């Protein structure tokens, strides 16, 4: 059961090879057995999951039409509201805060018969790239527990890699789905901005945030993206007109696909093992029919600065709410401990509030924030021109494979280098997939990124499916710890 994909699991329960209760019970037991070693979960909702499993089983038994992922257990990052559960964002500020309503994506999971196993560890308020800035301690990488699973959705990737959940949801503001996928050898999609509702997602930086799926392979992720995408009256920025529908007919070739390869990607120091895996991927995709062309990525030396200025500016505005007595009264409902001003944010969040307030201050906003917004517009224009030539762009997800826990990437210059390949998709609102593409010399996964034009998820998923037909990296599992 732990080797089956989410789509296979749903098929198995519908074919009565397995009951939904058996499936959920097995996953809960696996979490109990494994999670002490990797710390991917913040909370496990065993009782409600089992109750839901019984309900879904009844629907199967009565022959109700069910969605392709019905009966499948899933876990979600702890910045997504689930009614009646604590949403912590891995922060002291929100510990004990019980959400009064579901995020739209949670409603969609429920409508489609998926079963929530629990909430997953993350960097505090999704700020970070190692899953170690939250109050619940770091999540560890299932491939090597001395290494980071990547952040901020580290719990979402580690849980799937360790076999504690067949699927998960994460959020991506500057790479937080794609980086953990690359570090943990799982597949993930950062969807086009405006294709998945953000209602009920606690923001990191609202103009960059997007919820997306993580899973064992691209077919599972595509199926989950079909479930969570679509318009939502509660989120005016969710401009998509209808949910994505993906073509599942077998594909093995990529004829007619022109893929751009940024020549100047070495602005970041790419580890030789990562470089080797990505270059080998290019050759394999060429054999499958894709045509590659080099280009120079404009503005690649400005993107990180623009990203951090915009992300911190927005974070400082969002988080100022938590010092507003009226807002605190509103969310401190009966049953919730009073969220007081005296509860502190952690150091990474404080640093961003200070930096964000600085770049928005009257004396500096013209030079920092305004210029960052200008760079953002130029990045969008540059991509528009690139997508007249290319169907998609290929790059590594990260310049290195998973760093050692405690190697404080967050405090150093490396923090800026680590997200160099991922932030531009968020600045321009574009979709991107993260796919396992090999291993470094220590046996740690390496990830490949394909970035496409807005709402070109179908094309990206087709290319990703071909990649996973011609390779088997996504089938590899970490050794049992
Ligand atoms: N590492 C980036 C940051 O810390 C991205 C975070 C994210 O995508 N949530 O801002």
Image (tube, grey):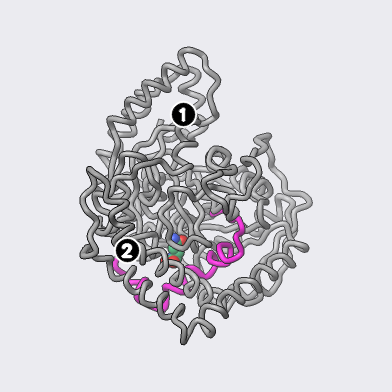
Q: Quadrant of residue 245?
A: top right
Q: Is residue 384 visible?
A: yes
User: Ligand 1 closer than 8 Å to the CB at disc 1?
Assistant: no
Residue 393 placement (x, y as % from top left): 66, 61
Is 429 magenta? The answer is yes
Residue 25 placement (x, y as % from top left): 31, 28
Q: Residue at the location (68% across, 51% down)?
A: 456
Mark 1 and mark 2 in contact (Cβ < 8 Å)? Answer: no
Q: Would you name the residue on which mark 1 appears?
A: 113
Is 161 above or below relative to 416?
Answer: above
User: Ligand 1 closer than 8 Å to the CB at disc 2?
Assistant: no
Q: Is residue 444 left or right of residue 112?
A: left
Which numbered disc covers residue 324?
2
Q: Residue at the location (46% across, 87% down)?
A: 363
Q: Is residue 466 visible?
A: no
Is 58 above or below relative to 227?
Answer: above
Secondary structure at numbered mark 2: loop
Is 116 magenta? The answer is no
Determine the CA span between mark 2 and mark 1.
Answer: 38 Å
């Amino acid at each position: 059961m732990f080797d089956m994909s989410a789509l296979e699991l749903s098929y198995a329960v519908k074919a009565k090879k397995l009951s939904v209760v058996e499936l959920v019970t097995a996953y809960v037991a696996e979490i109990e057995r494994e999670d002490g070693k990797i710390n991917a979960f913040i909370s496990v909702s065993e009782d409600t999951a089992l109750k839901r499993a019984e309900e879904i089983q009844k629907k199967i038994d009565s022959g109700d039409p069910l969605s392709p992922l019905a009966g499948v257990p899933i876990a979600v990052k702890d910045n997504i509201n689930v009614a009646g559960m604590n949403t912590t964002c891995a922060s002291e500020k929100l510990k004990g805060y019980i959400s009064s309503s579901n995020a739209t994506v949670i409603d969609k999971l429920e409508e489609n018969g998926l079963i929530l196993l629990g909430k997953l560890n993350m960097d505090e308020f999704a700020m970070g790239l190692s899953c170690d800035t939250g109050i619940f301690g770091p999540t560890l990488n299932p491939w090597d527990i001395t290494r980071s699973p990547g952040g901020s959705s580290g719990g979402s990737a580690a849980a799937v890699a360790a076999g504690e959940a067949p699927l998960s949801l994460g959020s991506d503001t500057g790479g937080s789905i794609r980086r953990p996928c690359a570090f943990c050898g799982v597949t993930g999609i950062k969807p086009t901005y405006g294709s998945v509702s953000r209602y009920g997602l606690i923001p990191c930086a609202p103009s960059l945030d997007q919820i997306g799926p993580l899973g064992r392979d691209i077919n599972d992720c595509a199926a989950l993206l079909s479930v969570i995408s679509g318009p939502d009256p509660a989120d005016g920025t969710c401009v998509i007109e209808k949910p994505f529908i993906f073509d599942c007919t077998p594909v093995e070739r990529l004829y007619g696909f022109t893929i751009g390869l940024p020549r100047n990607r070495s602005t970041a120091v790419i580890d030789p093992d990562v470089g080797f895996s990505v270059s080998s991927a290019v050759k394999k995709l060429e054999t499958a029919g894709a045509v590659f062309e080099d280009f120079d990525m404009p503005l690649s030396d400005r993107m990180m600065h623009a990203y951090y200025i915009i992300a911190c500016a927005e974070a400082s505005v969002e988080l100022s709410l938590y010092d507003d007595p009226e807002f605190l009264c509103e969310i401190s409902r009966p049953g919730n401990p009073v969220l007081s001003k005296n509860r502190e944010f952690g150091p990474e969040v404080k640093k961003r509030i200070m930096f964000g307030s600085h770049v928005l201050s009257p004396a500096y906003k013209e030079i920092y924030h305004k210029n960052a917004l200008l760079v953002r517009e130029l990045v969008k224009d540059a991509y528009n021109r690139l997508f007249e030539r290319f169907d998609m762009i290929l790059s590594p997800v990260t310049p290195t494979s998973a760093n050692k826990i405690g190697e404080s990437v967050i405090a150093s210059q490396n923090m800026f280098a680590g997200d160099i390949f991922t932030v531009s998709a968020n600045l321009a609102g574009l979709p991107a997939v993260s796919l396992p593409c090999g291993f470094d010399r220590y046996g740690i996964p390496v990830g490949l990124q394909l970035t496409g034009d807005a709402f070109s998820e179908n094309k990206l998923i087709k290319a990703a499916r071909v990649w996973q037909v011609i390779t088997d990296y996504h089938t590899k599992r970490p050794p049992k710890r």
